Amino acid sequence: MKNIWILVVVFALGSCATPSSDTELKGVGFFTPDPESTFVTGSDEITDLWTKYLDAHNNQDLEAIKSMSADSIYILGPDGSETRTKEQQSALLEQWFAAANPKWDANWAMPYKSLPGGEEWIISGHAVTETVEGEESVTLQMIDGEIKDGKVHQFFVYAAKPPSRDTAE
């Protein structure tokens, strides 16, 4: 009986071993443009950076946002609009902050890493509340963003209106 427990412990410990490099990891999922790509869970350092990025947006701190954005940031908005520099991003945000005072409330986030390339991404869901002429409206957003060298390099915003309470019941 003792030998069985030793085998169980050995197999359990062996199954918990972490591969020594990304090339040994087998990820999950797929990316159609690159059939070799798969994904694994990323680092919470990416989550922390994203949280600070949202905080800077909520505080309307354009300088902090610019310091966390890559010079040639690429943003694809939910309406198909494209932003290609942090100066363009800053100008758009300045107008949006003045017009609607948007506030982001993150509901979830998950950092992930692509294999074999090692690109770091975060996907997260937010409720964005805007106030225009005293009227509040909420939009649900999902953002998929790439982080490179400690900066937000690009992100894609998907948006939808939440269901009305009548249809949610």
Image (spheres, grey):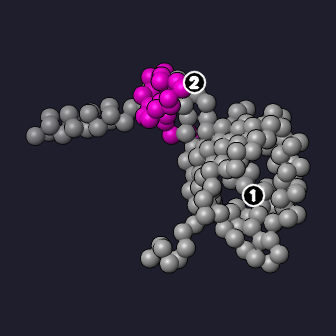
125 or 159, which is in the foreground? 159
| Residue 60 visible, this orientation | no
Q: At numbered mark 1, what does the secondary structure look like: helix, strand or loop?
A: helix
Q: Is residue 160 above or below residue 16?
A: below
Residue 123: image x %, image y %?
A: 58, 46
What's under tag 1, amino acid-wise?
Asp
Residue located at (18% from left, 40% from top) = 5
Left or right for 163, reference 81: left
How many other residues sit within 10 Å of disc 2, few (<14), some (14-19) or many (≥20)?
few
Q: Please, is residue 7 above or below residue 139 in the view?
A: above
- The quarter in which the N terminus is drawn is top left
Which of the two discs, 1 and 2, labels the residue nearer the N terminus?
Answer: 1
Determine if residue 75 is in view.
Answer: yes
Q: Is residue 166 left or right of residue 81?
A: left
Label 2 sits on a secondary structure element that is loop
Q: Label 2 sits on what residue type?
A: Gly
Residue 165 drawn above or below residue 55: below
> Pointer 2: what residue?
117
The single residue placed furthest to the left in the displayed view is: 1
The magenta stretch is: 23-46
- Residue 55 marker: 1
Q: CA distance from mark 1 to mark 2?
A: 29 Å
Image spot of residue 11 (x, y percent): 26, 33
Relative horizontal placement of residue 83, taking residue 38 as reference (left or right):
right
x and y percent of residue 88 in the render? Answer: 86, 43
Q: Nearer the viewer, residue 123 or 91?
A: 91
